[in-house]
Amino acid sequence: MKIKSLLAKPFANYIYSKVRKDMQSAVEDQKAVLQELLKTGVKTQFGKDHHLDQVKTYEEFKQAVPIRDYEQYKSYIELVKQGKHNILWKGQPLYLAKTSGTTSGVKYIPISKESIDNHINSARNALLCYIAETGNNAFTDGKMIFLSGSPELERVGGIPTGRLSGIVNHHIPKYLRTNQLPSYETNCIEDWETKLDAIVQETIKQDMSLISGIPPWVQMYFDRLTETTGKQIKDIFPHFSVLVHGGVNRYHRNLSRLGRIYCFPGFPVRGRIIAEHQLWYLF
């Protein structure tokens, strides 16, 4: 057992106990968080337009800020992109996360200094809870790949902007950097097919224990590995035991062919939009 796996277990047990304890007061905690957010929100352009100074309860908040799609936020986002301050949150966002979908084209999701830890700690805590529940900490000693967008960021309105996965790449803890693949240079390749080939070459002979990415990217990575070697994934990476992914369920059938899988949902915050993620455990 190496130092990382040795230290991971007590830390995992500590976080797991804290998460279980916090579950008992989740509703009260959410009410407290709402009040804290309102204290700042009332000072923003969005808060003034929606009269948040008159909001005291969750029911009043629902009335003042009904559920809406991106288009109904777009006018505020455009002001943020122009470099304006105090629009949706105090000051300027720490980042703008670019994402694309079936509607509205490219979307820009503000990420504040206060919210960035949600993106890091939610994934970390999910893995630590897995260690605490299963006892499997060996994967922390192996190589880990995070299939992500380019970590190179542009600036829009003076704000660093890029894909969320690329942004998060800048916040991976130092203690995981020595385990992390692919290299920074490979991660910066823009053309996906070229990048995929480079990732395969970098990882094909490594002792991969954790693989993370959105399902289509993971599926293409596995397909390219199989095409290149003629082997199954379990034979290429015999110590591969944890697959972390977000996204939609239609890839479950393909990914489940990797082996016997235990799965549970988690809900990390993504750009303040809660999206279901899955951790798959391969035994």
Image: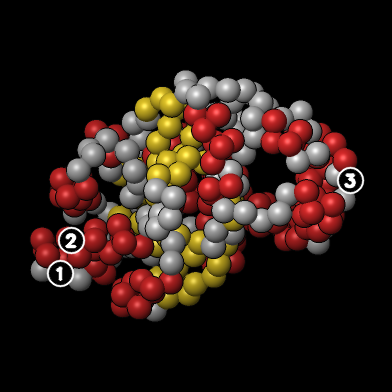
Residue 224, position in %: x, y?
17, 60
- 102 displayed left or right of 49: left
What residue did someone put label 2 on?
Answer: 225
Residue under the point 49% across and 72% down: 263
Dot 2 lies on which element? helix
Looking at the picture, which amino acid does disc 3 mark? Lys
Find residue 231 and name its label.
Answer: 1
For label 2, the crowd category at 10 Å Cα-Cα, with few meaning under 14, some 14 to 19 and many 20 or more, is many
Choose top left, top right, bottom left or bottom right for residue 135.
Answer: bottom right
Residue 11, position in %: x, y?
61, 49
Q: Closer to the N terminus: mark 3 or mark 2?
A: 3
Mark 3 vs mark 1: in front: 3
- 194 displayed left or right of 83: left
Choose top left, top right, bottom left or bottom right for residue 55.
Answer: top right
Residue under the point 78% across and 45% down: 33
Residue 78, position in %: x, y?
52, 33
Looking at the picture, which amino acid does disc 1 mark? Lys
For label 3, the crowd category at 10 Å Cα-Cα, with few meaning under 14, some 14 to 19 and many 20 or more, is few
Q: Are marks 1 and 2 in contact (CB under 8 Å)?
A: yes
Q: Estimate the spatial distance between the alpha carbons at disc 3 and disc 1, rounded to whole Å.
A: 60 Å
* Residue 15 visible to the viewer: yes
Looking at the picture, which amino acid does disc 2 mark? Leu
Q: Viewer-proximal residue, 221 or 160?
A: 160
Find residue 56 and name its label.
Answer: 3
